[in-house]
Amino acid sequence: MKIALACIALASLTIVVSSARQPAPSRTVVYEGARVIVGDGSAPIDDGVFVVQNGRFTAVGRRGATTAPASAEHVSLSGKTVMPAMINVHVHMGYEGYTSWGAANYTDRNVLDHLQREAFYGTAVAQSVGTSPTEAAIQFQRDQEAGKFPPAARFLFAPGMAPPNGGPDAVLRVATSAVGAINEVSTPEQARAAVRRMALGRITHVKLWFDDRGGTYPKLTPQVTRAIIDEAHTHGMTVHAHAIALADQKFVVSAGADVLVHMAQRERVDDELVALLKEKRPYWATVIGLGDPTDVCNPDPFFEQALPASVVAKIRATTERRPLEPSCGPPAPNAAAREETMAYNFPRMIASGARIVLGTDTGVHPGHTFGSGEHVELARWVQLGLSPMDAIVAATSRPAQLMGVTDMGTVAAGKRASFIVLDANPLENIRNTRRIRAVYLDGAAFDRNAMLAKWRKADTGSR
Ligand SMILES: [Zn+2]
């Protein structure tokens, strides 16, 4: 039965590939007149011009300061704003099926669907952290690099490490156990051996959970955690560490984790963490926007367009607040206190040297669609005091640096031409990142209308 299902999935995937594959654009195109947000924090180029050839920017500058071949095609973007496509360093792909959720959904076809949703909303690279089965993920990356899939965000992944029966939250834990996605380790020796295997497989990022979920979960010991980080660094690998409690955040930062995942929401940042951040300057994936239900409740077509109507209706009908679950109920009793703590912690983390990067946790729990969460996270940052320009840097060039995708993340000569065309300026209002006119991946327009048609079809089919 399982084999038969896999064959059907594979057969239909092949059809999608052959009908959607497009030749690489070899013509030269000059895009003129947009306000260009480069993505590195430099001042925007008003009335900018950029040239795209063979999927890359070949020149970027002010009108009159940029040259292009006489034969080039010209596209006017006057009145628009262009920013680099985003890079999301923290999602959990493969389990979300919109009308179902779980390990049974984990197929290449579904991972591809999630990457297409990311691209639809302006993300060019997304990293699945800790919850993708390693062999399948490596094969998917190979196939995508070989051009076997239709256009979508680029798939990156980091294997996960936790003690037996530890790691992801209770919902995700069921799914990851079924597909054997987590490397379970109990001793420093096991941890080092697991990391060495990853290094041999040319894996460059690894995720660990350092959390006992309020005393309900086994937690990695400090010795095992140090062994993971030390062995990873020996092999030039980057360590993402999930830690929520203040003491746990201090420990993973002091132990040398490269990326701190999550924000302490119940305890205030203290002088000890501030000193550690100043010394270590870790990257920081805040991952705070996921539980925000207001955009589906308001309602906003920007989110609804990618969700089946039945899912939207279910979210609106859910009035009981549960952690991570989208609902339109009243705020949780502790919401105001948490908000106050976050408003205290966020600017202090940034001022102390935490290098903020975009991560959303999408896919961790049913009912959140891939790609839209990026826009929620950016708006949350700005609400908590980050400038829109710094928010865009944290969604583009900084995650590119973290992930080692050095030919992405800015609108600059030599980089891949993956960018978003916006109808309004996000530097004036960060919510304008949602005013998407077009998304380009490697110089080719991503077919957003085809995605909308696909989702509408799936939606009517499911009712
Ligand atoms: Zn996560």
Image (cartoon, helix red, strand yellow):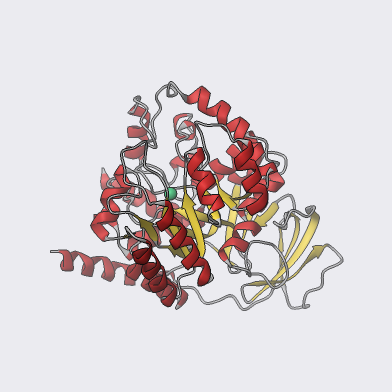
Q: Residue at x 62, y 37 (%)?
A: 346
Depth check, front residue: 163 or 171 = 163
Percent position of residue 138, x then y: 39, 71
Q: Is residue 422 visible?
A: no
Percent position of residue 89, x then y: 52, 56
Depth check, front residue: 87 or 151 = 87
Q: Residue at x 71, y 47 (%)?
A: 389
Q: Residue furthest left?
A: 1
Compared across the picture, whether 305 is left or right of 393 comes to left
Percent position of residue 28, x then y: 68, 75
Compared across the picture, whether 15 is left or right of 205 comes to left
Q: Residue at x 63, y 53 (%)?
A: 280
Depth check, front residue: 234 or 51 = 234
Depth check, front residue: 423 or 111 = 111
Q: Residue at x 37, y 29 (%)?
A: 316
Q: Is residue 257 visible?
A: yes
Q: Residue furthest right?
A: 64
Percent position of residue 191, x then y: 38, 64
Number of callouts in the render? 0
Locate the N terminus by quadrant.
bottom left
Q: Residue furthest front?
A: 223
> Where 346 falls versus 417 (above or below)?
above
Locate the C terminus by quadrant.
top left
Q: Quadrant of residue 250?
A: top right
Q: Quadrant of residue 430?
A: top right
